[in-house]
Image: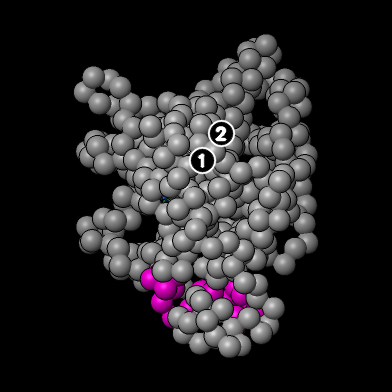
Amino acid sequence: MRVVHLFTRDLRIQDNEALTVAAEHELGFAFCLPSDFATLLPIRSNSLIASLEALQEDLPSQLAVFDNIDELVSALVEAEVDAVFATRNFDTNAMLWQANLAEALYGAGIALKLVGSNYAVEPGTVRKDDGNPLRVYTPFYRRWSQLPIPAPFKVDLASARCFQLKGAAIPSAYNIAVKIRAGERFALRTLERFMVSRATSYDSLRDRSDLGGTSHLSHALAHGEIHPRTILYRLGSSAGEDVFRKEIAWREFYADVLFHNPHTLTEYFDVKYAKLRYDDPAEKHELLAAWIEGKTGFPMVDAAMRQLKSTGWMHNRARMIVASFLVKDLHFEWQIGARHFEEHLTDYDPASNSHGWQWTAGCGTDASPFFRVFNPITQGEKFDPHGDYVRRYIPELAHIPGKAVHQPWLLVDGLAHGYPTPIVDHATERLEALARLKEISS
Ligand SMILES: Cc1cc2nc3c(=O)[nH]c(=O)nc-3n(C[C@H](O)[C@H](O)[C@H](O)COP(=O)(O)OP(=O)(O)OC[C@H]3O[C@@H](n4cnc5c(N)ncnc54)[C@H](O)[C@@H]3O)c2cc1C
């Protein structure tokens, strides 16, 4: 049988169940660019291109790239392909895309075989005793952690019979300052580095935005350069590794929630919060622009937003702080922030992003309650206690030593290099947010 492995968000060779099964046949390799590829910001398209280029280096024949399903199907028909293998995706848009692909392939007489997933436990598997899906993380985790996880799948493509599918080459990357390191081999090295130097202290260091205490595996997981099974298989039983396992489970939980509630990609999980009074970004565009540019006058918020803009990644604690600030200090809807993250994050993941935002905005699963409003100053002092994170990203504050950098307006020369005064008064906006909550709570 002549088959093609269609890569999607599984840009790796090892521990790829679908590819392992496909490799039993005469095999070609394909990738379809996302439909919004032409409009992606350079940092997002470069992150995909970097993953594809790294994948290509490890493939025994050329990866054929297509702009859309129609082009792909024509090439498959011409090459007399019998079946397409792909990893099953579970997020809202990917499921729609898979349905369109299935229809087009069916019309051409080609089978579609969706095998495995990019999760240790496939979304839809963990259920309550009554068969309903879980809406709260802790009971999800309890059940999830009891399920058997198979050993990573191994494949030897050197001994596979390969053919060359006719398609385009990988598009060229933009020439931008941020150089993205990607690929399966880099992901495995990143995991090893983390295991050797940080895994056992992960529980105590993961919240510190100034330290590299986290794994930085999110790009690799989002592009499927590594399977979570490979990560879980490598973990031991220290307190740090246990907390890390729980973070991997958050990714699995959000994927499960989005699978059962596909509308929550862009809509409220807790619909009550759709009725909250939000501000119109068109009327308050200067506030939104200040948040986007990292010029709110709150150093922790601004360092985080500048980290995002300059690197395509942001520390998890910082993601929560900027999300809380956008929703509860500036009173904008979470979707505005989620869209901005989607445009800039090289680890963009539909489920983790939409539900990370909703968790912080207070309208998601086990949401941090709406009335819990992060104080951007005390959060900064706690999670960047020496001010190093702020100084790294905000040159206008580089002259201020220590944690005083979190309140530069208190210093005589604190704002001497052009850093702005706060665009809002946090205490006032916190009360405003709570007042708006009261309007929908009666
Ligand atoms: C508002 C908001 C938006 C977010 N958007 C995304 C996104 O688009 N893509 C994304 O991968 N993560 C997202 N996260 C989750 C988290 O911030 C990142 O996964 C993490 O910062 C990535 O860095 P790391 O790989 O070093 O994480 P580590 O701390 O080393 O964690 C290891 C892995 O566990 C998973 N993970 C960790 N924390 C979470 C979490 N809270 N929710 C879901 N998965 C988690 C990730 O896959 C991560 O790579 C978001 C969080 C918030 C609060």
The disc labelled 2 sits on which kind of residue? Thr
Magenta range is 380-399
Residue 393 in magenta stretch: yes
Q: Nearer the viewer, residue 327 or 427?
A: 427
**In contact (CB < 8 Å): disc 2 and disc 1:** yes
Inspect this view and state whether residue 377 appears: yes
Principal SS element in the magenta part? helix
Q: Nearer the viewer, residue 180 or 22?
A: 180
Q: Is residue 89 above or below residue 60?
A: above
Q: Nearer the viewer, residue 407 or 229?
A: 407
- Quadrant holding the C terminus: top left
- Rendering coords of residue 122 (x, y %): 39, 32
- Label 2: how many residues lie within 10 Å, few (<14), some (14-19) or many (20+)? some
Query: Toward which corner of the image does residue 272 lie, by quadrant?
Result: top left
The residue at the point 44 percent across, 41 percent down is 437
Q: Is residue 2 above or below residue 186?
A: above
Q: Is residue 188 above or below residue 262?
A: below
Report which residue position mark 2 lands on: 266
Report which residue position mark 1 lands on: 354
Inspect this view and state whether residue 254 appears: no
Q: On the picture, is 188 further left or further right than 339?
A: left
Tell me how many marks there are: 2
The disc labelled 1 sits on which kind of residue? Ser
The residue at the point 69 percent across, 20 percent down is 80
